Image (spheres, helix red, strand yellow):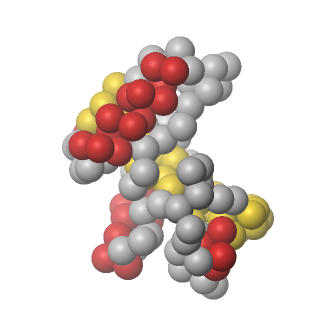
Amino acid sequence: MLRGGRGARFRRGGGARRVIACDLDPDALAASEANAALNGVSLELSDDLDACLALADRVTAADILYDRDNLPLLARFRRAGAPVLLADSRIAGLQPPGYRPLGNWHATTWPDLGEASEFNQVRLFLSEP
């Protein structure tokens, strides 16, 4: 299950038997679908987070904390019981309860959107069991 504000990127050979992209934004879902097609990955689309979480054995989430009102999603993901991989570049010093940091990486969008350099530092977190 994937959730992200800009659409997900996929590659062949990822090992998943089933991938569901979940987002409220139809444009994000369309971008995910186009990327999956370009990479030969089978993908289902959904805007029903609860249904997706009920099926998930892994959850990835990226670009969801641009709005701090989305912070409760982190606890909601963990309650689903599947491991959660979270990527964030928006909240400096983020230390979400129940998640451990995996590291920081420099990243830019393509095409470059000219965002402030502070948003080019992506932090990855993994939910604790």
- Residue at the (60%, 73%) spot, across then down: 119
Q: Position of residue 37 (x, y in %)?
A: 46, 19
Residue 49 visible to the viewer: no
- Residue 70 location, quadrant: bottom left
- Residue at the (56%, 51%) spot, across then down: 111
Q: Position of residue 109 (x, y in %)?
A: 59, 55
- Residue at the (53%, 62%) spot, across then down: 113
Q: Is residue 15 above or below residue 89?
A: above
Q: Position of residue 96 (x, y in %)?
A: 55, 75
Q: Residue furthest bottom?
A: 93
- Residue 95 location, quadrant: bottom right
The one nearer the camera, 49 or 87, is 87
The one nearer the camera, 109 or 57, is 109
- Residue at the (35%, 45%) spot, across then down: 28
The one nearer the camera, 80 or 49, is 49
Q: Quadrant of the N terminus?
A: top left
Q: Position of residue 120 (x, y in %)?
A: 66, 68
Left or right of 76? Residue 82 is right
Residue 87 visible to the viewer: yes
